[in-house]
Image (cartoon, rainbow, N blue to C red):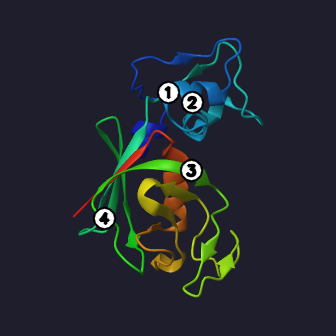
């Protein structure tokens, strides 16, 4: 999957995207419904000390959005781009309840994390060692979230989906506001 998505050898669209005057990494990403980081990571050998595109650059692109399926029974998240497999990640489920089956949309993302409240209601800011959410927090509809967890333990509010720090960073970089996550048994 890494070779298909991040290699410059394959093009989902059949051809490279040629950067036009006025294009930015963000504007190209918005057209394709993927995070700008995905396009940058795929083409990073063309970027020297900057994340700016130049007219005439040929970029490998993928049309998004990415979407994921979380299997509660198998404790796995499977990532897809279009109908193609793009990776599988082990997950931990929140300690105070299980997510419900259904399809949820990405609402908001924060690389720093998100404020977290313990059972007594005390709030801990992102980055605090007591915060049950790690970095690369993704808020979903239905009061669910996806985030990094320490040592594979799941803490946080009812129904959260925890990933290792490395996997949370990968997922954060691929899911966009147009992405959906389906939870199944």
| Residue that label 4 marks | 100
Do the numbered discs 3 and 4 sit on residues whose CB atoms are within 8 Å? Answer: no
The quadrant of the image that shows the C terminus is bottom left
Local secondary structure at mark 2: helix
Q: Residue 168 location, x and y as percent?
A: 51, 60
CB-based contact (under 8 Å), mark 2 and mark 4: no
**Picture coordinates of residue 65 (x, y %)?**
43, 36
Query: Residue 53, located in which quarter of the rendered image?
Result: top right
* Badge 4: residue crowd in 10 Å (few <14, some 14–19, many ≥20): some
Q: Badge 3 local density, few (<14 within 10 Å), some, or many (20+)?
A: few
- Real-space Cα distance between discs 3 and 2? 17 Å
Q: Counting other residues with Cα less than 10 Å from the Cα at mark 1, is it few (<14), some (14-19), or many (20 or more)? A: some
Please report contact status of discs 1 and 2: CB closer than 8 Å, yes or no: yes
Q: Which mark is residue 32?
A: 1
For residue 29, the mark is 2
Instruction: Give the quadrant of residue 67.
Output: top left
Counting from the top left corner in percent of width and height, residue 116 is at 61, 73
Q: CA distance from mark 2 to mark 4?
A: 31 Å
Q: Is 106 placed above or below 10 here?
A: below
Indicate which disc, 3 or 2, sits on the residue closer to the N terminus.
2
Q: Which residue is mark 3?
A: 108
Q: Residue at x 30, y 65 (%)?
A: 100
Mark positioned earlier in the residue sequence (1 or 3): 1
10 Å crowding of disc 2: few (<14), some (14-19), many (20+) = many
- Can residue 1 be seen in the rendering of this structure? no
Q: Residue furthest bottom?
A: 120
Left or right? Give the position of 128 relative to 92: right
Instruction: Report the residue at 49% width, 32% height from top.
Output: 33
The earlier-in-sequence mark between 1 and 4 is 1
């Amino acid at each position: 999957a890494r070779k298909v998505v991040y290699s410059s050898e394959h093009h989902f669209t059949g051809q490279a995207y040629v950067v036009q005057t006025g294009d930015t990494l963000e504007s190209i990403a918005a057209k394709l419904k993927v995070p700008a980081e995905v396009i940058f990571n795929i083409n990073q050998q063309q970027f020297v000390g900057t994340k700016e595109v130049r007219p005439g650059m040929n970029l490998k692109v993928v049309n998004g959005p990415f979407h994921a399926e979380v299997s509660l029974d198998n404790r796995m998240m499977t990532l897809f781009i279009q109908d193609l497999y793009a990776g599988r990640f082990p997950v931990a489920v929140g300690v105070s309840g299980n997510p419900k089956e259904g399809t949820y949309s990405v609402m908001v993302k924060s690389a720093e994390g998100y404020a977290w409240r313990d059972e007594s209601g005390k709030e801990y800011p992102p980055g605090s060692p007591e915060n049950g959410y790690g970095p690369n927090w993704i808020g979903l509809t239905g009061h669910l979230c996806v985030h990094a967890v320490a040592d594979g333990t799941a803490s946080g509010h009812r129904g959260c989906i925890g990933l290792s720090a490395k996997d949370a960073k990968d997922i954060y970089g691929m899911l966009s506001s147009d992405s959906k996550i389906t939870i199944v048994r």
